[in-house]
Image (cartoon, rainbow, N blue to C red):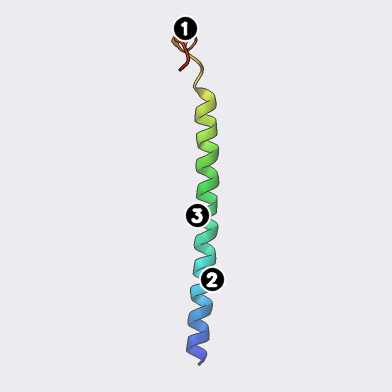
């Protein structure tokens, strides 16, 4: 019974750690995407072409 509880505790802690890493990665990617999109300025031909 003790080995089962230790295995479950280790498994749960690994899953919590992995979910924290995944959330951090998602937040970094969203921030990077926002920064990259703000760096792209409007080009002249964007204003001269009609919108569809």
Whole-percent x and y of residue 7?
48, 81
Check the image and report above or below for 34 versus 22. Answer: above
Assign a secondary structure to mark 3: helix
User: In the rendered image, which residue does mark 3 sit on?
Assistant: 22
* Comes first in the chain, label 2 or label 1: 2
Image spot of residue 33 (x, y percent): 50, 35
* Mark carried by residue 8: none
**Alpha carbon of mark 1 to alpha carbon of mark 3: how far?**
42 Å
Q: Secondary structure at mark 2?
A: helix
Q: Nearer the viewer, residue 46 or 40?
A: 46
Q: Residue at x 55, y 45 (%)?
A: 27
Rounded to the nearest angstrom, the CA distance separating label 2 from label 1 is 56 Å
Examine the rendered structure and indicate whether residue 50 appears above or below residue 4: above
Picture quadrant where residue 20 is located: bottom right
Q: Residue at x 46, y 11 (%)?
A: 50
In front: mark 1 or mark 3?
1
Of tags 2 and 1, which is closer to the observer?
Answer: 1
Q: Position of residue 14 (x, y in %)?
A: 49, 68
Kindly identify the residue that appears in the image at 54 percent across and 51 percent down. Answer: 24
**Residue 40's spot in the image, x, y percent?**
49, 22
Q: Secondary structure at mark 1?
A: helix
- What whole-number distance in Å separates the C-alpha atoms at marks 3 and 2? 14 Å
Q: Residue at x 45, y 17 (%)?
A: 52
Mark toward the start of the polypeptide (3 vs 2): 2
Rate crowding at label 2 as few (under 14), some (14 to 19) or many (20 or more) other CA atoms within 10 Å: few
Closer to us: 49 or 15: 49
Point out which mark residue 13 bears: 2
Q: Which mark is residue 48?
A: 1
List the single residue furthest toward the bottom: 1
């Amino acid at each position: 019974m003790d080995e089962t509880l230790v295995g479950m505790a280790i498994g749960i802690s690994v899953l919590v750690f992995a979910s924290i890493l995944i959330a951090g990665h998602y937040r970094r990617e969203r921030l990077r995407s926002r920064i990259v999109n703000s760096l792209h300025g409007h080009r002249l031909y964007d204003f001269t072409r009609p919108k569809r």
